[in-house]
C-alpha cells in the first residue's frame, strides 16, 4: 500500500466522521424534563436581607437557573430574612 493513498483515505474518513458529528439532530429530552411532571413552586428562606445585593442576587440567580433548567416546572422564590420565619 502506498503512503499517499493511505493518508488520503484516513483524511477522507476523518472528514466524514467530523461532518457526521456536526450534523444537526433532534434534541434529546433529559429524563428529568418529562412533560408529565407537575409544576412545583417553592419559597427559599435566606438568612440575609434584600439590601445585600450580591448575596441575595445570587439566590435569585440560582432560582432563575433552576427554573430555566426545568423549563418552568420548578419555580423557586427567594425570600429575605424574617419573611417566612420570623426572627426570635
Image (tube, helix red, strand yellow):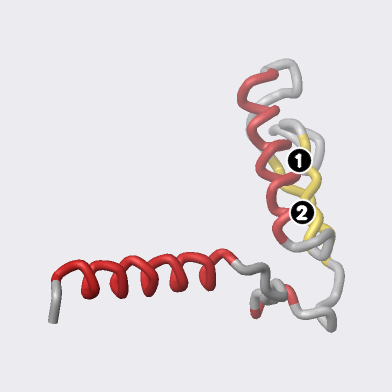
| Label 2 neighbour load within 10 Å: few <14, some 14-19, many 20+ | some
Residue 22: x percent and y percent? Answer: 56, 64
- Is the residue under label 1 in contact with that under label 2 (CB below 8 Å)? no
The residue that appears at 75% across and 44% down in the rendered structure is: 64
Front residue of this view, candidates 34 and 15? 15
Question: Which badge, 2 or 1, is on the more N-terminal residue?
Answer: 2
Query: Which label number is shown at residue 46?
Result: none
Residue at 14% over, 70% down = 3
Identity of the residue drawn at 72% across and 31% down: 81
Label 2: which secondary element? helix
Query: What's the distance in space between the residues labelled 2 and 1, CA to CA?
Result: 12 Å
Give the vertical position of 78 relative to 57 (above or below).
below
Quadrant (top left/top right/bottom left/bottom right) for the C terminus:
top right
The quarter of the displayed image where residue 26 is located: bottom right
Residue placed at 65% from the left, 80% from the top? 31
Q: Nearer the viewer, residue 46 or 22?
A: 22
Quarter residue 1 falls in: bottom left
Against 66, is 74 above or below? below
Few, some or many residues within 10 Å of mark 1 (<14, 14–19, 20+):
many
Q: Mark 1 points at which residue?
A: 78
Which residue is labeled 2 in the image? Answer: 67
Nearest-to-viewer mark from 2 and 1: 2
Residue 8: where, in percent of width, then height?
Answer: 30, 68
Position in image of residue 24 (x %, y %)? 67, 68
Amino acid at each position: 500500500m502506498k503512503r499517499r493513498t493511505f493518508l488520503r483515505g484516513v483524511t477522507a474518513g476523518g472528514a466524514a466522521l467530523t461532518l457526521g458529528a456536526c450534523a444537526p439532530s433532534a434534541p434529546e429530552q433529559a429524563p428529568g424534563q418529562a412533560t408529565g411532571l407537575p409544576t412545583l413552586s417553592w419559597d427559599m428562606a435566606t438568612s440575609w436581607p434584600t439590601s445585600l445585593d450580591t448575596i441575595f442576587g445570587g439566590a435569585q440567580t440560582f432560582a432563575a437557573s433552576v427554573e430555566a433548567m426545568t423549563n418552568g416546572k420548578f419555580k423557586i422564590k427567594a425570600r429575605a430574612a424574617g419573611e417566612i420565619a420570623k426572627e426570635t
